[in-house]
Image: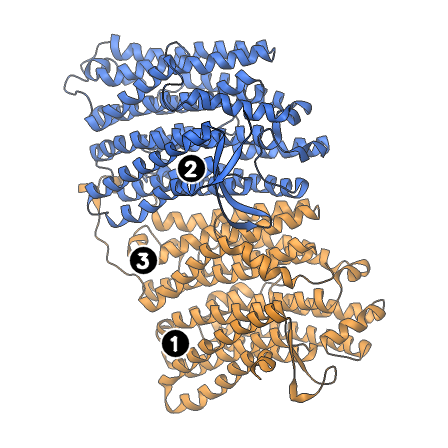
Amino acid sequence: MIEANLPLLVPLTFLISALVIPLIGLRVPGAAYPLALAAVLATIPIAGFGLYRVMDGGPVSYTLGGWEAPIGIEFVLDPLASFLTLLVTVVSCLVLIHARHVASVEHPDKQVPYYSLVLLLLAGFCGIMATGDLFNLYVFLEISSLAGYGLVAIGDKRSPVSAYRYLILGSVGTGFYLLGTGFIYVMSGSLNMADVARILPQILDQPAVLAGLILMVTGIGLKTALFPLHFWLPDAYSSASSVSSALLAPLGTKVGAYVLIRILFFVFDPAAVEQRVPITSVIAWLSAGGVLYGSLMALAQQEFKRMLAYSSVAQIGYIGLGLGMANPLGFTGAVLHILNHALMKAALFLVAGNLRVQLGHSNIAAMDHRLSRQMPWSMAALVVGALSMIGLPPTAGFFSKWYLVLGGIQGSYWVFVGVILLGGLLNAIYFFRVVERVYLPFRRGPSNQAAPNGGQEVVENREARFSMLAPTLVLAGALLALGLASSFLVNRVIHHMIPAGL
Amino acid sequence: MNDLSTYPSAVPLLAILVSAASVPLIGISARRPNLREFWTLLAAGAKFALVLSLLPSALANRVAETRLFEISRGIDLTLRADAFGVYFALIASGLWILTSIYSIGYVRGLKEKHQTRYFASFALCLSATLGVAFAANLLTFVIFFEVLTISTYPLVIHKQTPEAIAAGRKYLAFTLTAGVVLVAAMAAMAQLTGTLEFQPGGLRALQELSPVEVKILFGMFLAGVGVKAAIMPLHAWLPAAMAAPTPVSALLHAVAVVKSGVFGVVRVVGFLFGPETLSRFGLNEVMLWLAGSTILLASCLAFAEDNLKRRLAYSTVGHLSYVVLGAGLLSPSGLIGGVLHIANHATMKIVLFFCAGAIYVNAHKEKISELDGIGRAMPWTMGAFALASLGLAGVPPVNGFVSKWYLGLGALEGGSVAVVAILLISGLLNAGYFLPIVYRAFFKQSENFNSIGEASAWMVVPLILAACFSASMGLMPDLFFHFFTLAERIAAQILEASNP
């Protein structure tokens, strides 16, 4: 019974709790947070069981209302979807634990709508992963997008403006996707992904089909912030509240990447498409541009969250590069980087949240070496996150780049290999800029050296409270552990995701 | 004779982990310096004992192996204590004991700040160094190589002066770039040959590649490990890194870090590419050119430095290339000489750095021109300095002579007279930039040092020990730990495997 319903359980749990929270929250505002946390906690075992079940016995499919596909709406849990669903639930759980105090400091009067929106966002995310229907995917995309606009709008003074920009551009993106779906529907007569995939080889020469694909990819590219469609992202992430950015930055763009994978590699056959329009090559080249552009822009930022936002543009570029290579190693690297980047970005955004709550700002120029003593654990998490972003072994970040480089060499994409490696060095520059400032007495050398008695100046402890620190450290620890476990993941999980066409 | 057999053993892993395990202990003992230093000494002693226990089996061509888990498809995180690994690990862990004792005297003598961070980073560095030594395949090697890069950084910037911070940036810029090149080379290797395992005599699969591929690949590898080996023009970080405290320069910039670089060069030459592939494509000629010019140029640059530590650094740059030269000769004696020089240079250069540190702690002098007459105030220190200087110039009976002799023999075996000339000229240049310091110290008069005496026993005893060690290794190269036999074994492994 449960097994048959697995695909729908996670999104449904989120959706129902998103509706229940305002109902109960109107009477008892304090219940909003426990309810949200309970919902997320409940989905982790379901998602975990889903992954186990899929790995064990193959994809699980569920038809809504008993209407068989392709007429009815089908929900399918395959390795890729179940893996990313688990990732979403785990990361959002850690972010929510962290959020309790942060949200009550940053926007105390908006708790009920806030947590309701968070769950709606997660319902959208998990629905996108679970659905096997192109139009249904659009519906969930809109659910998550609308919730996302709301979440971005709850932030500092500039956030309504960036939310409005995000809304306009996001709607353009989903609009493009919808238009593309329409093209495909008209040409193939079906919306079910598996069904469309069966029909497509016969009609792939029709210009309308290819136009539909390009429209869909453009629309999703906007949602994924694939360079050069990234321009909404830095504003949206840096002015949103710490909790919203910690949810949206690691997960939002990853869900976009998932849709890209689903459509490019599972609905369409990348090799057949490439003969007609060079869509994977275009994605790869644009992504390479994104890696360099995002890294260079990150160098120029003075605000930590804004720097992280530009760094996201670069890291999405890595994922795009792996997908654009269209070979198994590149694909493995891309999926591994989806996981790794979600974790490291979450860790770094939680650090940013700690800074905002404890110091009231996250301005790089205003940080100095006292911070390493005031918040030693948060800063240690920052260092681990930074090492992983740079891609130094044995952190997780090294291994995704390793597979990407292997993929690049396998396909003889020398330029991409160069870009991946150069991007790592640029990462090193902008992260060490922060690390240096936090740990070293900057431009103070001699006066500090003369401090009496070994000069242990007294600094107050301003470390974040346990509920904020624990998720941050768990994520940082995961970066170390996952680095060593990456081969296990690749062999046992990611290997089964590689689409047949590659 | 040369058949290698492996047996599973956890000792290599334990030898690596023992100092990493001391890091948290050092951290929680931050407020009790004596306990904290006890952990360091305990870890150093345990590490050395563990490595020493691997020596008999390495001499018997039985190789202890720790196979952990898969880290990339078909590649396990594997540690293998072969002769070369044990050789390097013995040097690094043995000298760590001396350096730890010396460090205690040094940092307390100067009342350095951040002593906990200092000892903790040191312990982590040694873990990484042994990882480099025992790595059985390239991926394992690179992982530890990068950990070494990062764990050395806090030591380079230890003084936290603007100069030290600038040196740290330079260090990271060089080593991280090299790391990236190494990763690219490794990925290309994995794709082209399908294996990353180190094999004595090199990988057969490489011989099936086109000349262009092999040449580019070798160039990338040489650049990747060459930064830590300070092959010119990739050496600029090393003199800058002298901003670090002297014990750091002594162990890391004369032994662990730079020797990881030349160790990497020999691994790449002997265990990845192999003599046959190299000589077929003329790549060893490139190494000889690079190493020869580095030896001569670095020696000339050393003359221009008045700062004692920076002069030592340029001398290190030159002597590291002796090892590269030995590897490039590809002849039995050349390889023995090159490998032996890893140990010999380590023991001599560590003496010189220890002396520089003792002078700095006691007399607060860093410049050579200010050292007139210091030999009378610190006779033991400067006596050891004189002995090690003579050794680096290649004067018997100090151990530097032995490795130079074998390098010279190797050059004659290969018929390259130019190399012999380089060795002779370099010996003279070494004498030229070291002996004036000794002359100043003992034969010039000054009133500067009337009030000071020898440094504390914590510092003098390790440096005298290291000096005695250098001298006795010159007289009997096989006396301690069978270094000579190990070097012979390593050369034989590399050469015989490629000419069955």
Q: Can you give x and y, in whole percent of width and height, for residue A127 in the image?
A: 59, 77
Q: Amino acid at mark 1?
A: His
Would you name the residue on which mark 2 appears? B130
* Residue located 30% across and 25% down the image: B354
Q: Evaluate whether residue A121 shows in this view.
A: yes
Q: CA distance from mark 3 to mark 2?
A: 32 Å
Q: Which chain is blue?
A: B
Asked if residue A338 is positioned above or below residue A453 in the image, the reply reads below
Q: Are marks 2 and 1 on the same chain?
A: no
Q: Which chain is orange?
A: A
Q: Quadrant of the N terminus of chain A?
A: bottom right
Please tell me whether mark 3 or mark 1 is closer to you in this view: 3
Would you name the residue on which mark 1 appears? A107
Label 1: few (<14), some or many (≥20) within 10 Å?
some
Q: CA distance from mark 2 to mark 1?
A: 52 Å
Q: Can you give x and y, in whole percent of width and height, for residue A492 in the image?
A: 58, 60
Chain on which label 2 sits: B
Q: Amino acid at mark 2?
A: Leu
Asked if residue B448 is positioned above or below residue A190 in the image, the reply reads above
Is A371 in front, or is B89? B89
Q: Quadrant of the C terminus of chain A?
A: bottom right
Determine whether the residue tagged by mark 1 lies in a helix, strand or loop: loop
Please tell me whether mark 2 or mark 1 is closer to you in this view: 2
- Marker disc for residue A375: 3
Instruction: Kindly check if marks 3 and 1 are in contact, taking CB atoms under 8 A apart as contact.
Output: no
Q: CA distance from mark 3 to mark 1?
A: 23 Å
Q: Is residue A44 left or right of residue B201?
A: left
Determine whether the residue tagged by mark 3 lies in a helix, strand or loop: loop
Label 2: few (<14), some or many (≥20) within 10 Å?
many
